[in-house]
Amino acid sequence: MPSRNLDGMNPLANYRIPFMGLKPGNHEFQVDVDSEFFACFPESEIQSANGTVDVILEYTKTTMTLRLELNLTWKVPCGRCLEELTFPLLHDERIAIRFGEKTEITETLWILGKNEYDLDLSQIIYEMSHLAIPSNKVHENESDCDPNMLGYTLNESEEESEKPSDPRWDALKNL
């Protein structure tokens, strides 16, 4: 889906896909995701990321299935040396969509009320992005880290290990 801002005031309007009027079958969209998207979520751990979400909407008269494939690159400081790293954020999601009296959203099933005419993908894209965050944000090989920073952190930990321990606490270690 090309970048479009349906509502000049709402930057998340680009993440809404209208389904009313679609013919039954598969419909493919591509949504661009960038730092502006994550700026709409103040609590987001992700600040600088770019990429796309491929969306396939399988539409029938009574149900829809939404398949999303997230493919982002995320810039974050290395947890070991603070040098900027680029991590891939990859995640796939499949959501069943039914029609009902009122709108109810769960992790794997969306029930759309009578007055719904589009799918707001902003929250699911936000959640998928955060689920894709690696637990350890460091260079794959320590040799890729900034040696100056590594030397600083190693010296700091050596200094801590050289400090004499408090005898009051040493007695507790024997318990």
Image (cartoon, rainbow, N blue to C red):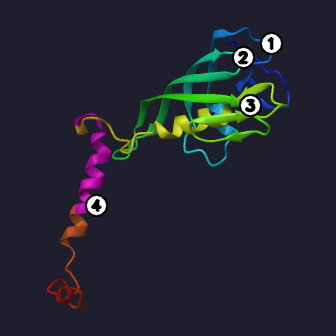
Q: Is residue 128 left or right of residue 25?
A: left
User: Dot 2: few (<14), some (14–19), or many (≥20) neighbours within 10 Å?
Assistant: few
Give the label, 1 or 4, closer to the camera. Answer: 1
User: Dot 1: few (<14), some (14–19), or many (≥20) neighbours within 10 Å?
Assistant: few
Read off the residue under disc 3. 12
Find out whether the residues at labels 3 and 4 contact each other: C-beta distance under 8 Å.
no
Query: Is 145 contained in the magenta span?
Result: yes
Q: Give the image quarter of residue 141.
A: top left
Read off the residue under disc 2. 61
Give the label, 1 or 2, closer to the camera. Answer: 2
Residue 163 appears at what percent x and percent y?
22, 75
Read off the residue under disc 4. 156
Give the label, 3 or 4, closer to the camera. Answer: 3
Q: Amino acid at mark 1?
A: Gly
Q: Give the image quarter of residue 166.
A: bottom left
Q: Amino acid at mark 3?
A: Leu
Q: Tell me the CA gap for discs 1 and 2.
A: 11 Å
Between 123 and 89, the one lying in front of the other is 123
User: Dot 4: few (<14), some (14–19), or many (≥20) neighbours within 10 Å?
Assistant: few
Read off the residue under disc 1. 21
State which region is magenta.
143-157
Q: Tell me the CA gap for discs 1 and 4.
A: 64 Å
Q: Secondary structure at mark 3?
A: helix
